[in-house]
Image (cartoon, rainbow, N blue to C red):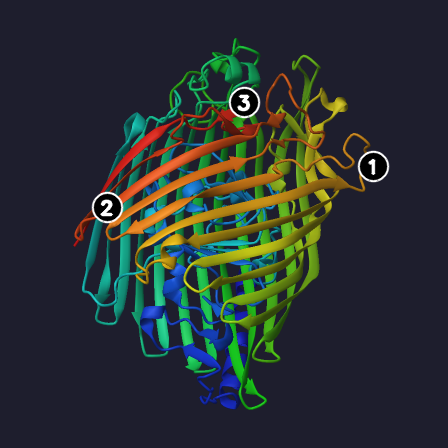
Amino acid sequence: MRSSLYISSIFFIFIFCFSVLFSQVGNTDNIKKNKTEQDTTNHDTKDTLQFKTADIKVSENKLNSFGIKRLLPVENSGIFAGKKTEVVIMESVTGNLATNNPRQVFSKITGINIWESDAVGLQLGIGGRGLNPSRVSNFNTRQNGYDMSADALGYPESYYTPPTESLEKIEVVRGAASLQYGTQFGGFINFQIKEGNSDKLYDISTRQTVGSYGLFNTFNSIGGKIGDIQYYAFYNQNMGDSWRENSKFDSFTYYGKAKYYVTENLSLSTEFTKMKYDTQQAGGLTDELFNDYDPRKSYRDGNYFKVDWNLLAFIVDYKFNSMIKLNSKNFLLDAQRTALGNLDPMIGNGSNSNDFSKREIIDGQYFNYGNETRLFYNYIYDENKVNTLLVGSRVYIGNTLQKQGDGFTGTDQNYTFKNPDSSLASNYVFPSTNLSLFAEHIFNFSENFSVTPGVRFEYIKTNANGYFIDNYYDLAGNLTKSFKKNENLNNERKFVLLGLGVSYWSSNELEIYSNLSQNFRAINFSDIKTVNQNFVVDENLKDESGMSADLGLRGQIADYLYYDLNLFGLYYYDKIGSYIHPDYGGNKYRTNISDSRTIGIEGLIEFNILSLISSNFSNKLSYFINFSFLDSRYVNSDNPAIEFNDVENAPNTIIKTGLNMNYERFKFSFQYSYTSSNFTDATNSILTPEAFFGLVPAYDVFDISFEYDFSYFKIMSGFNNMFDNKYFTRRSESYPGPGIIPADGRTFYFTFELNY
C-alpha cells in the first residue's frame, strides 16, 4: 500500500514538473479572440479552462432553455471534442425531484433503460445502449468528477446517488469516455452538485415534499461566499412506506463543500458527503403472483437493506498561466452495505413465503482512495490556431471486505451474523490496485475541423483472499453436500486503450462528430465469490474487452429546434452473460458466453413552438421526442441455443416523448415513456417457475408535473404513473428479490420551496 502511495506521489510530481517546464515555453497570451474565447480567471465559472471555438459557439441561454446541452470541447477538466456528450440542466427539469424520479430526470438522455427498484431512487439503476442497468455498474459514476461507487474495479456498483434537488447538472459521456475516465463500456456519468452563490454572503433554500403512501422529504441548503471562501451545504431526509407492502424506508444525506481561492491562480476545495438509509424490501414475485394477484402485496416481511456511505475529497486547481492548468482530485470512500433476507425463490402462489429460518446476511465494507491528476497545455501554431493537450494519471487503491452467512430467524432488522466465527458461507478480502496514464490531444486543423486522438495505459491488479463453502444441491433444491474452499487468487494485467474522435462544424447550428475507442471491463471477484443457490458463476470467468463507435449530428436551428442524432455500435469480446445450465440443476449460469454486437440509432429532437410566434425566449411550449432503436445479439457462440439470441437487458425500443411549457411563472410537463420487451438471460427464456429469469414485457408510463414560482417561494405537484399501469422493469436473482420486482403504481406528490 505504501508503494502505491509512493507511485502516486511520483506521478503527481512528474506532471507538476511537466507543467512547469511548458509554462516557461508556452506563456503566450495572444490568442486571437475571434477564434477562441477563453475563461480562466472568473471564479463564477469554477475556474475551469474552457475553449469555445467561434464556429460552434451557441448561446448558453438558448441551450439551457431546452434543458439539455452538450459539453464544450474542453470543459470541467476534460476533453470532449468528437464525443457523444449530453448534459441535463437540472433547473429546467419539471418533475418529482424529491423521489429522484429517473424517468423525468433522464427524459432527454438517449437510450437509457431504467430499473425501478424502490420508491425514492435510493439505488439508481440505469443502463445505456443495451447494458445492464444494475446500480449504474456499466458507467464510470462520479460526483463532482471523483469516484463515488463501491469499488471502481472489484465492485463498480453505486449504492449512493446524490439527491437530485442538490444537483446543478448531470453530465453523460458515452463509450469514448473510457480513454479519460476508465474502463467502462457505458461511459461516464458525473453528478455535479450546486455551488454557493458567489454574489451573496448566504443563500438559503428549503423544500418540503409530501406524497402518497406516507412520503415525506425535506431538503435544506445554504451557500454563499465569505471573503475568499465559497461554500455550499445541504441536508436531505426521505421517509415513507412505499406503494408495496413491507417497503418502509428512511434515508438521510448531508454534504458540505468549501472552496478557498488562495490566489487568482490557485484554489483548494474540500468536500464531504454522508448518506445512510435503512429500507425494508418487499421481495420478488412469481409471474403467477404478479399477473393473477395484487402486485402490491409482499409475501416476505423479513428482508432488509442498509447502507452507510462516506465520501471525502480534496481538490487542487492551479493555473500556471493562460495556457496551462493543473487539476488534481484526491478522494476517499469509507462505506458499508448490508443485506438481510430470505433468498429462496418464490414458489407459485407464495406458499413458501413465511420461512424465516433461512435469512442470510451479505455484508460488504469498502475502503478506497485515489488520486487523479490532469494537466492541460494549450499552444498556438500557424499564427492563430490553438491546440489542446491533456495528460493525466490515476492511482486507485481499493479494499473490499465481504462476508456472507446465516442471520437470525424472525422478521426484525437484526443485521448480526448468527455464528460469525464458525458458519459463514464466505469470508473474503478483495484488494485492488489501478495505475493509469492517459493523454488526449485536440488538433484543430482548420476553423471547421478537428481530430482528437487518445491513449490510455492501464495496470490493474485484483486479489481475492478468503474462503467459501461450496454447496451442491439436487434437482429439488435440497442440499446434498458441502465443503470449505480456501483461496488466495490474484489477477494482474497491463494493456493500452486507443481511440480517435473527429469533429466537423459547418456553421453555428451544425456539428458532425464521430469517434472510435477501445473498451475494457474487469471481472469482479466479489461477484464470483458470492454464494447463492439461485445461480452459479464460472470460476474461470475472464475480463471483457471490445470497442465502441459513434457517428452523430447535433445542433440547433435558430431558437426553435434542438437536435442530437447518432448511429452507434458496441462490440464485446467474451461478453459475460447468463443462461439456464442443465448441469447445475437448471440454475442460472454466469460465464463468458460469447462475443456480442450492438448496433443502433438514437436521437433527441425538441421543437419550441412558441419561438415561431414570440421573441420572448423565457416563454416556451416545446414538444420533444427521445428515441432509441437497437439490435443487440450474441455472435460467434459455440452454443447453438445462444447464437444470435438477444443480449439480456437490451430493449429494442425506448421512447420518451412529451410537452414542456414555461409561461411567465408557470411550468408544466407531460411525459410518455415506452420500453419494449427484453429478456433476462442469454437463452431468451419466456417464463420460468422461479421467475428470476424470463421475459420483461413491454410497458408504458405517463407522468405529469406542475410548478408555479411566486418569486420568494414555489409550489410543485404532479402524478407519476398517472394511469396506474401495472408493470415491472426487472427480475432479480438475489436482493431485493428473488423474482419479479414490481414498479410503483400511481403516486402523487406536493412540494413547497422557500428561498431567502
Secondary element at image label 3: loop
Q: Position of residue 166 (x, y in %)?
A: 33, 50
Residue under the point 23% across and 66% down? 225
Quarter occupied by residue 576: top right
Looking at the image, residue 286 lies above or below residue 627: above
Whether residue 679 is visible: yes
Left or right of 63 in this view: 463? right
Foreground residue among 75 and 138: 75
Q: Amino acid at mark 1?
A: Asp
* Distance between the alpha carbons at the discs numbered 1 and 2: 59 Å
Secondary element at image label 2: strand
Marking on residue 343: 3
- Give the number of marks: 3
Q: Residues within 10 Å of mark 3 (few under 14, many from 20)?
A: many
Q: Amino acid at mark 3?
A: Leu
Secondary element at image label 1: loop
Foreground residue among 97 and 607: 607
Which numbered disc flags the more N-terminal residue, 1 or 2?
1
Image quadrant occupied by the C terminus? bottom left
Q: Position of residue 357 (x, y in %)?
A: 49, 14
Foreground residue among 326 and 211: 211
Marking on residue 708: 2
Residue furthest top as drawn: 351
**Mark 1, mark 2: which one is toward the viewer?**
2
* Distance between the alpha carbons at the discs numbered 3 and 1: 32 Å
Q: Residues within 10 Å of mark 1 (few under 14, many from 20)?
A: few
Q: Position of residue 398 (x, y in %)?
A: 54, 51
Q: Position of residue 571 (x, y in %)?
A: 71, 50
The residue at which mark 1 appears reads as: 638
Marking on residue 276: none
* Distance between the alpha carbons at the discs numbered 2 and 3: 46 Å
Looking at the image, residue 622 lies above or below residue 590: below
